[in-house]
Image (spheres, rainbow, N blue to C red):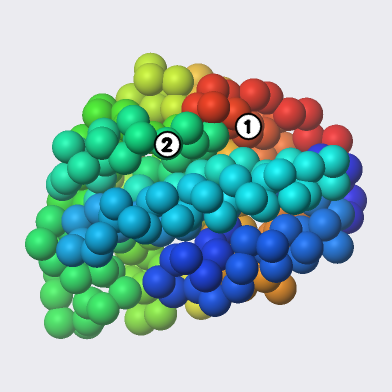
Amino acid sequence: MKYKNIIDMHSHSELSFDASDSCNALCESAIKKGAAAIAITDHCDIDGEDDFDSYCKEQFEATKAAKEKFDGRLKVYQGLEIGQGIYRKNKVEKYLSLYDYDFILGSLHNLENEKDFYYLHYTDIDVYPLLQRYFDDILKLCEWGAFDSLAHLTYPLRYIKGREGIKVDLSRFDDVIDEIFKSLIKNGKALEINTSGLFGELKDTMPDKALIKKYKELGGKYITIGSDSHYANKMCQGITDGYEIAKECGFDQVTVFEKRQPVLINIE
């Protein structure tokens, strides 16, 4: 790899409903690709009906075992991706108090009581009111702040623009996106550069370079970069691209979180 400090802060093991490889397999793959550290951040879509008591316990123990097994070869951060947290705040706060996580991603995969954006058919609807509701709820999520890094800010575009080819004028949401960034900055939270879109139909990071630059211009300090890998062979995919974009946008450091506290790492 071009950089020595390759760090992938977004990955999913077999404990995520849509992934299939063990924590150990993720770690082995990351080591082969020259990674210095990874975060294992399995899905916890908290608005679902799953048994989160047993799930969170199993996931935390599995990531802890990987952390201990690969100590000295790979830094493993124990994480979780909390989906739709603002719709079930009490549940989120309960599980975050039970386990000593390193890192929490915050995301919205769907609006309250609705399907994941993946399942919607955008040719039949006006996407702008939908996106307005999405960004408004992202702002509420950021104001609540029960996470460390905001995952894939422009997630719906993966399907609206990438899959269905619908052009979207994001400038319509400049005001609310500015408020999202200001809230992240005020609360000491990070913005994720999610590289998975580079290898799918979107052909871009989430968010794109223009929004990352805006975050920096507003005073953004913390960024995390994640492949959003759901398979061991995809670990660290696009991290080098993410580093290049980060540098172009004015960042000389990426952020990791240890025991929920930000640590800056030089891009080198």
Q: Could you give the CA–CA distance between mark 1 and mark 2, rounded to whole angstroms?
A: 21 Å
Residue type indicated by callout 2: Tyr
The residue mark sitting in front, 1 or 2, is 2
Residue type indicated by callout 1: Thr
Where residue 255 is drawn, which disc sits there?
1
User: Of helix, strand and loop, which one carries label 2?
Assistant: loop
Of the pair 81 and 206, the residue shown nearer to us: 81
**Which is nearer the N-term, disc 1 or disc 2?**
2
Which corner quadrant holds the N terminus? Answer: bottom right
Which corner quadrant holds the C terminus? Answer: top right
- Work out which residue is located at the far left of the displayed protein and give it: 113
Crowding near the residue tagged with mark 2, few <14, some 14–19, many ≥20 C-alpha atoms within 10 Å: few
Residue 142 placement: quadrant: top left
- Vertical placement of 96 versus 164: above or below? above
Viewer can see residue 46: yes
Of the pair 6 and 174, the residue shown nearer to us: 6
Q: Percent position (x, y) of residue 201?
A: 51, 77
Q: Which residue is mark 2?
A: 99
In percent of the image, x 68 and y 45: which residue is there?
67
In percent of the image, x 72 and y 58: which residue is there?
27
User: Of helix, strand and loop, which one carries label 1?
Assistant: strand
- Vertical placement of 118 versus 71: above or below? below
Q: Percent position (x, y) of residue 90?
A: 17, 37
Crowding near the residue tagged with mark 1, few <14, some 14–19, many ≥20 C-alpha atoms within 10 Å: many
- Vertical placement of 143 versus 228: above or below? above
Viewer can see residue 180: no
Residue 204 placement: quadrant: bottom right
